[in-house]
Amino acid sequence: MNRLRGKRVLITGASAGIGRACARAFAASGADLLLSARRFPNLESLRRELTLEHGVDVAIERLDVRDRAGVETYVAKLVVENRLPDILVNNAGLSRDLLPFHEGKVEGWEEMIDTNVKGLLYMSRAIIPHMVARDQGHVIHIGSVAGDTVYPAGNVYNATKFAVRALNEGMNVDLVGTRVRVSSVDPGLVETEFSEVRFRGDRERAQTVYEGYTPLRAEDVADVVHHVANAPEHVNIHRTVVYPTDQRNPYILHRGDSE
């Protein structure tokens, strides 16, 4: 059953990867979209694609979730336009470097904390009060299995994803008694721009992350997000962990022949 037709979905970091795949999945179900990201030209091309293929309403915004004032201004504009979302997908996130803690780059730490934690907080804090006032809504965080188990040189990135897991639980507890749902979808290894961003544009090094096995694709994660969002309103899928079949926990990965 399609429960998403006519809903409005706000997706942060929608210009590429999981965010873009989520936009396509929701548009295919007839949901209208509010897409934000820093790379505005990517949003423009995605809007043209989705409106042409699915006939849904797609509004785009150049937005950096690290900018608290920018987030608050954006949401205030949505209020004025009567375009508040029914579903918020907190997708914007990144990793920088893969270094032992004592060799870490503080500017990279700050970028991860500001995006993965504070950006999620800013957007959630701006949107959720409106959901509470309507007694309806759904917030879906894109977390990671890095929020379960620390891996060597992951340190601060791990910490940000542990924070996302804690915030997912904390928001759920605080929203008890309302009909506002909070969920997280926590993937294992996904082949997107993630590793290229982590390694600061080193494509050759990034590609080695995905060699010898079949990783998840952005579309696989988007399918799970869509499933979570499409659940009946009395059902809150609190947390979903999804791995590629070749990976069974953050440390156990079979590298053999990939597709």
Image (cartoon, rainbow, N blue to C red):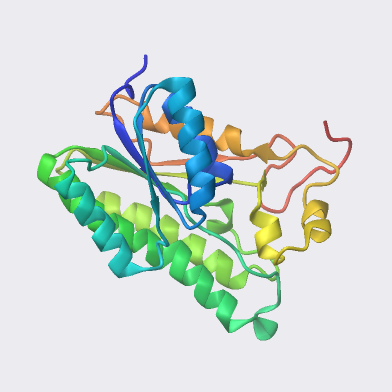
Tell me residue 53's x, y (percent). 49, 22
Left or right: 257 as drawn, with respect to 67:
right
Q: Position of residue 26 (x, y in %)?
A: 43, 29
Q: Is residue 113 above or below residue 192?
A: below
Residue placed farthest to the top in the image?
1
User: In this view of the protein, can residue 176 be seen by the observer?
Assistant: no
Q: Is residue 122 left or right of residue 112?
A: left
Residue 163 at x, y = what percent? 43, 63
Between 99 and 13, the residue placed more toward the observer is 13
* Residue occupying the point 72% across, 63% down: 201
Residue 170 or 52: which is nearer the viewer? Answer: 52
- Please indicate whether residue 71 sits to the left or right of residue 112 in the image: left
> In which quarter of the view is residue 69 placed?
bottom left
Q: Quadrant of residue 120?
A: bottom left
Q: Could you tell me which quadrant the C terminus lies in?
A: top right
Whether 173 is drawn above or below 69: the answer is: above
In the rendered image, residue 19, in percent from the top left (x then y), is placed at 50, 44
Query: Is residue 90 shown to the viewer in this render?
Result: yes
Q: From the viewer's perspective, is 131 left or right of 158? A: left
Give me the residue at 33% from left, 24% from top. Answer: 4
